[in-house]
Image (tube, rainbow, N blue to C red):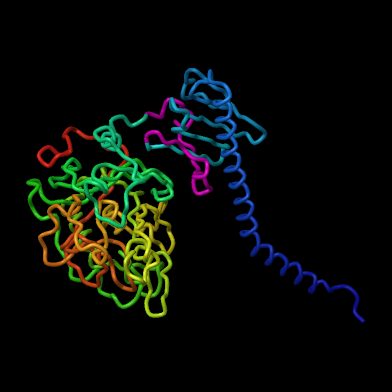
């Protein structure tokens, strides 16, 4: 009976252990790094909570927290913040007059987080801070508490100031817009239907004070965005009386025989992987390159255009997508049947539904900051499915876009390979075939107006 190991066997065991350690080490390091990131995010959230409590408990506190101390004036930008706590975390918090956090910066020397609220009256929220916000290479001006300046006279704020926004709590979205069912500027009374939890302001019905001139073309304001920007839809050339379309395509894309093909981009085998452009996207992108590319700095790359491909519901004979179940309340294959239509601005990233240029807020599948309107956005503007109501012509959304033989494409999937469109009568409809195209863009939060009152004769 052999006792112990020979030298060769011992070396072999050591070699195997070394290989196992080499294989496992990257995963161990990743786990360790993740734990450090999670700990830093927890510390950042704790700082916000304690700072807010101090401000609440003592009304004499000033609006800037610098390195753990309330200050009445900013130290020189070159001065580093005092370290606080055993973890050597330093931070600056800027509050507005209402106590909202308008800017939050925190660093532990290796990572840093910087969050800025761009929506007036809304602050940085703790639940929005995640490890995805951690960055390295701390900027030189990171420790300056004077760096933050609010955007004054933003387009977002101008729209609110020029109107008398009303809550949409009394609107019945099962009926078209009208003098008794919504005309003017409204806001989401329940932010569960807002975009990323933020209140959204939107125009509804037959209004004539949401015209915008940009790039030599006229647009209509559709709504604000969760970033504090403004979403516009194309409405013709500078005369204000031309067609609201840039062209057309009889098919949304080259394939319409499966539910993957409802994407603004698509992969016939999955919602991810290598993407093909839809026919409509190619046309929209080409138009952008020829007409709007020089205005690129005005448009947000993080704004979301929603192609709601969330998990389709199989009925035994067809696949039904969520927009159909929300909006088509008068057909018995819809979950809303017998109830009422309920549009939403919520767009989860389920099945890569959030179309963006930047991958920080969505799928990153857009190559240009332009896409199409959603069926939900059209419903907020005053439209109802054409099976449920024959006409929805009260809405501004149909100006310059109704004297047509076929409908114009929206971005929302309907049933199986079908995509929503706006039909000639102004109602929503699910189609394999429509034709006309109206692009939408989202302006950055920092865009301001140079004049105008929002009318066709004097647009913003």
Classify residue 162 by image quadrant: top left
**Chief secondary structure of the magenta portion:** loop
Question: Which is nearer the eye, 77 or 324?
Answer: 324
On screen, residue 423 versus residue 242, left or right, reads right
Residue 269 in the image: x percent, y percent? 39, 75
Task: Give the number of callouts.
Answer: 0
Residue 9 in the image: x percent, y percent? 79, 74
Above or below: residue 227 compared with residue 78: below
Classify residue 44 by image quadrant: top right
Q: Which residue is drawn at 30% across and 43% down?
A: 186
Question: Which is nearer the eye, 130 or 429?
Answer: 429
On screen, residue 165 versus residue 398, left or right, reads right
* Residue 309 visible from this viewpoint: no
Quadrant of image for the N terminus: bottom right
Q: Residue at x 31, y 73 (%)?
A: 417
Classify residue 376 by image quadrant: bottom left
On screen, residue 433 versus residue 314, left or right, reads left
Residue 433 in the image: x percent, y percent? 21, 71
On screen, residue 188 versus residue 394, left or right, reads right
| Magenta run includes residue 399 | no
- Identify the residue at the far right of this view: 1
* Residue 21 visible from this viewpoint: yes
Quadrant of image for the C terminus: top left
- Identify the residue at the far bottom of this view: 1
Instruction: Tell me which segment is drawn in magenta.
Output: 120-149
Q: Residue at x 9, y 39 (%)?
A: 457
């Amino acid at each position: 009976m052999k006792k112990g190991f020979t030298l060769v066997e011992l070396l072999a065991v050591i070699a195997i252990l070394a290989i196992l350690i080499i294989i496992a080490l990257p995963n161990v390091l990743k786990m360790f790094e993740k734990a450090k990131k999670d700990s830093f995010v927890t510390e950042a959230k704790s700082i916000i909570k304690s700072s807010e409590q101090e401000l609440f408990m003592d009304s004499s506190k000033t609006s800037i927290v610098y390195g753990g101390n309330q200050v009445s004036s900013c130290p020189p930008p070159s001065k580093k913040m005092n370290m606080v706590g055993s973890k050597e975390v330093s931070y600056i918090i800027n509050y507005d007059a209402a106590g909202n956090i308008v800017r939050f910066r925190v660093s532990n020397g290796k990572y840093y987080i910087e969050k800025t609220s761009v929506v007036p009256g809304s602050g940085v929220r703790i639940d929005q801070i995640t490890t995805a916000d951690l960055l390295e290479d701390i900027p030189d001006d990171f420790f300056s508490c004077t760096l933050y300046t609010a955007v004054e006279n933003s387009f977002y704020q101008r729209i609110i100031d020029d109107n008398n926004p009303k809550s949409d709590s009394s609107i019945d979205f099962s009926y078209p817009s009208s003098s008794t069912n919504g005309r003017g500027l409204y806001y989401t009374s329940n932010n569960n239907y807002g975009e990323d939890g933020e209140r959204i302001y939107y125009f509804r019905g037959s209004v004539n004070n949401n015209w915008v001139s940009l790039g030599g073309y006229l647009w209509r304001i559709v709504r604000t965005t969760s970033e504090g920007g403004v979403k516009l839809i194309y409405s013709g050339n500078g005369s204000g009386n031309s067609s609201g379309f840039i062209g057309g395509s009889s098919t949304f894309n080259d394939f319409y025989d499966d539910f993957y093909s409802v994407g603004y981009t698509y992969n016939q085998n999955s919602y991810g992987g290598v993407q093909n452009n839809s026919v409509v996207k190619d046309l929209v992108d080409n138009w952008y390159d020829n007409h709007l590319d020089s205005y690129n700095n005005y448009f947000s790359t993080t704004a979301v255009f929603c192609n709601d491909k969330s998990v389709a519901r199989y009925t035994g004979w067809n696949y039904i997508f969520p927009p159909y179940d929300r909006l088509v309340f008068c057909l018995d294959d819809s979950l809303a049947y017998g109830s009422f239509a309920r549009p939403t601005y919520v767009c989860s990233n389920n099945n890569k539904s959030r179309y963006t240029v930047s991958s920080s807020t969505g799928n990153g599948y857009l190559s240009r900051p332009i896409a199409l309107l959603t069926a939900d956005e059209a419903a907020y503007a005053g439209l109802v499915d054409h099976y449920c109501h024959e006409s929805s012509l009260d809405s501004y959304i149909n100006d310059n876009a109704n004297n047509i033989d076929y409908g114009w494409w929206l971005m929302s999937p309907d049933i199986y390979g079908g995509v929503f469109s706006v039909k000639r009568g102004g109602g929503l409809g699910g189609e394999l075939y429509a034709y006309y195209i109206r692009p939408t863009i989202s302006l950055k939060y920092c865009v301001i107006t140079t004049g105008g009152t929002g009318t066709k004769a004097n647009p913003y």
